[in-house]
Image (tube, helix red, strand yellow):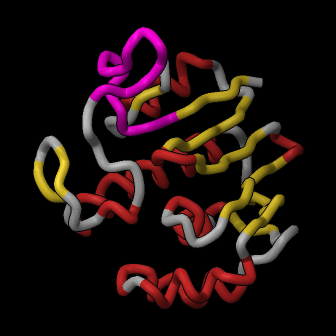
């Protein structure tokens, strides 16, 4: 099984120690802050977030998944505070009330559950053991995917959405 770290960060901008050298935004909490290419807007954030979601869903489908199960859920007790704390999260309130350990979510309904994690409202692993597939989101806007798909196929899909595999 391949274990991939996927991000918006250009591989050529990592130094020899693996540190990224450009001042870029790294989370939803950076909306409104200034970076090398200007102030991060909600619209720009949402566009990038959507690319992550599309990569995750494409890889899940190609791996044969029709559902993902939520496991290792953390932060469920505070999730509504995070959802109601930001206007761009309000649309996630219904999903936030449904999320729970062991919940099996049809692949067509997974996007907003993933958004809860990528927006740091909670943390969870989304997996399908039958198809050796899992997704989780780490610090600094990294998405971790484990799949049996060939690396070349993963790399092609990631590239199609203007994202990168971490070197």
Residue 140: x and y in percent read 47, 45
Q: Residue at x 32, y 61 (%)?
A: 30
| Front position in the image: 124 or 38 | 38
> Which image quadrant for residue 71?
bottom right
Residue 152: x and y in percent read 54, 16
Q: Residue at x 57, y 72 (%)?
A: 121
- Residue 32 in the magenta stretch? The answer is no
Q: Residue at x 26, y 39 (%)?
A: 23
Looking at the image, is 57 positioned above or below residue 14? below
Count of marks, rendered view: 0
| Front position in the image: 148 or 115 | 115
Residue 27 falls left or right of residue 99: left
Residue 117 falls left or right of residue 106: left
Looking at the image, is 18 positioned above or below residue 33? above
Magenta highlight: main SS: loop
Residue 113: x and y in percent read 61, 69
> Which image quadrant for residue 14?
top left
* Residue at the left extreme of this rendering: 38
> Which image quadrant for residue 146?
top right
Looking at the image, is 22 positioned above or below residue 13? below
- Residue 8 in the magenta stretch? The answer is yes
Residue 87: x and y in percent read 36, 86
Residue 88 falls left or right of residue 52: left
Looking at the image, is 75 positioned above or below residue 40? below
The magenta-colored residue range is 6-21
Locate the N terminus by quadrant. top right
């Amino acid at each position: 099984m391949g274990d991939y770290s996927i991000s918006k960060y250009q591989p050529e901008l990592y130094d020899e120690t693996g540190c990224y050298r450009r001042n870029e935004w790294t989370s939803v909490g950076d909306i409104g802050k200034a970076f090398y290419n200007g102030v991060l807007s909600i619209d720009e954030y949402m566009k990038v977030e959507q690319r992550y979601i599309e990569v995750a869903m494409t890889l899940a489908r190609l791996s044969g998944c029709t559902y993902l199960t939520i496991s290792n859920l953390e932060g469920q007790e505070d999730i509504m505070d995070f959802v109601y704390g930001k206007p761009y999260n309000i649309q996630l309130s219904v999903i936030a009330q449904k999320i729970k350990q062991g919940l099996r979510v049809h692949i067509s309904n997974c996007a907003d559950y993933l958004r809860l994690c990528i927006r740091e409202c909670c943390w969870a692993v989304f997996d399908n053991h039958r198809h050796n597939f899992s997704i989780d989101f780490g610090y600094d806007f990294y998405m971790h995917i484990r799949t049996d798909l060939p690396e070349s196929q993963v790399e092609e899909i990631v590239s199609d959405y203007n994202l990168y595999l971490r070197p």
